[in-house]
Image (cartoon, grey):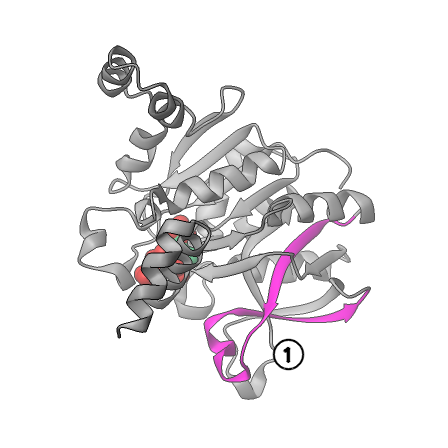
Amino acid sequence: MSKPLRKVVFPVAGLGTRFLPATKVVAKEMLPVLDRPLIQYAVDEAVDAGADTLVFVTNRYKHAIADYFDKAYELEAKLQEKGKSDLLAMVQGTLPKHVRAIFVTQPEALGLGHAVLCARPVVGDEPFGVILPDDLIWNTGRGALGQMADLSRAQGAAGVIAVEEVPHDETDKYGIVAATPVDERSAVIRHMVEKPKPADAPSNLAVVGRYVLPGRIFELLERTTPGAGGEIQLTDAIEALLKEQGKVLAYRFQGTRFDCGNKAGLVRATMHMAMQDPKLAAVVREFAASH
Ligand code: UTP
């Protein structure tokens, strides 16, 4: 891939059942880690990677995401009137001015692969990024997707997929890769399988929610039939890309990942962010000491 990464897709049309009943009306991606919703961390990472076009794949329950990135006339006028310029800048800064947000719908939750395919009319035939906002990856330097975009360009890879080692008995929760190491952070993927039982897993290197993919993946997704869990799996289309001799790299990103798709991960992310702030860190320490 030699073109810059301009477009990033956010598949946010899942049902979020692990956070019911809140997710009856609150999109999972709008759950806050301190004062920022998960989707804001994801958007900041995409912008850091160089994206100027953000494609949100949503459903009819997720209007709050579009509202969040829209102009808030009344609120902004009030903050202006009261001279609260810091808050005004914060409200206006959810999306930088040079970045546009485009919303497409996934009419039915048929799987992550299907959600990505819904973005095809906007992305077209160019390389693009995918961020699953419930995987929050925190890094003080370049964001994970930016690191992957840089690697993709440097290596001329068709794709780059973020991976992390997981406990062997948890392989059935993830896409798992078999890969040949290139250096300490990257490896060439030979094979990928979605949610294998620990006994069948080719390794414990699990795919996490960041991808750099070529436009070609859409063609392959069109041909992908439902796989694990009866869903159209992105992993299966990437496996088809590998079979076409596409060079796809697995990349161990710099940063800390919090799986905010479950309660324990959201609690950990919240504590981690709290520890960055001296006043809140004192609250966490005091709470831990007294429990
Ligand atoms: P998850 O497997 O976390 O599913 O999806 P979910 O529905 O969001 O949450 P649970 O498991 O019911 O609690 C991984 C990512 O893929 C998106 C989700 O929004 C999430 O970002 N997704 C999944 C879609 O956009 N559409 C789908 O059909 C499935």
Q: Residue at x 33, y 20 (%)?
A: 71
- Where, quadrant-wise, is the C terminus in this rendering? bottom left
Q: Residue at x 37, y 50 (%)?
A: 279
- Where, quadrant-wise, is the N terminus in this rendering? top right
80 lies above or below 253: above
287 or 93, which lies in front?
A: 287
Q: Quadrant of ligand 1?
A: bottom left
Where does residue 193 sit, x and y in percent of width and height?
A: 58, 71
Where does residue 84 sit, x and y in percent of width and height?
A: 31, 19
Q: Is 121 left, or right, of 39 in this rendering?
A: right
Graded by Cα atoms within 10 Å as few (under 14), some (14 to 19) or many (20 or more), the crowding at tag 1 reads some
Where does residue 251 sit, x and y in percent of width and height?
A: 68, 59
Residue 170 part of the magenta segment: yes
Q: Residue at x 52, y 24 (%)?
A: 99
Q: Residue at x 77, y 66 (%)?
A: 184
Q: Which residues are magenta?
A: 157-182
The number of numbered badges drawn on the structure is: 1
Amino acid identity at mark 1: Ser
Q: On the image, numbered disc 1 is attached to which residue?
A: 203
Q: Is 244 left, or right, of 161 in this rendering?
A: right
* Residue 59 in sight: yes
98 lies above or below 226: above
